[in-house]
Amino acid sequence: MTQYLVAIHRPDGYDPATAEDEAMIEGIHALNRDMIAAGVRTFAGGLQSETLAKSVRLQPDGELLVTDGPYLESKEHVGGFWMLECASIDEALAWARKAAVACRASVEVRPFHFRPPPA
């Protein structure tokens, strides 16, 4: 089976404390319970504000530059994600549709690139 990243996108400055009501929180919990019961969820997590992010960039001279903020400047950022193990992209998309409804947000689905570990 393939692993998929199902990522929730949130706008800049998204504050869960003010944006998420009890119905939304329960919807997300219900989705998590369904994913666990179906045996597809391998990991899930919410991310704190993009304002708390740090980025590390390799410079041409080999030095590492640490800056405040997300790696890319954007109007939206990943706010949380699930790692799912699904038989197909269609199965992962079915879960993503449920995630979009529960989280009231845009969702991105990406299969993981698998490489066997080095010998």
Image (spheres, rainbow, N blue to C red):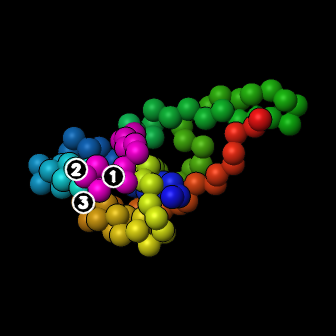
Q: Name which residue type carries label 2.
A: Arg
Per the model, the C-alpha gap separating discs 1 and 2 is 10 Å
| Mark with earlier residue (1, 2) | 2
Q: Name which residue type carries label 1.
A: Gly
* Residue for badge 1: 39
Q: Which residues are magenta?
A: 35-47
Q: Is residue 80 visible?
A: no
The crowd level at tag 1 (other Cα within 10 Å; few <14, some 14-19, many 20+) is few
Q: Of tags 1 and 2, which is closer to the observer?
A: 1
* Residue for badge 2: 33
Q: Secondary structure at mark 3?
A: helix
The crowd level at tag 2 (other Cα within 10 Å; few <14, some 14-19, many 20+) is few
Q: Of tags 3 and 1, which is closer to the observer?
A: 1
Image vertical order of residue 118 relative to residue 79, above or below: above
In the image, 101 versus 50, the foreground residue is 101
Q: Name which residue type carries label 3.
A: Ala
Locate residue 84, reporting x and y percent: 42, 53
Q: Residue at x 66, y 33 (%)?
A: 56
Locate residue 20, reporting x and y percent: 20, 49
Per the model, the C-alpha gap separating discs 3 and 1 is 19 Å
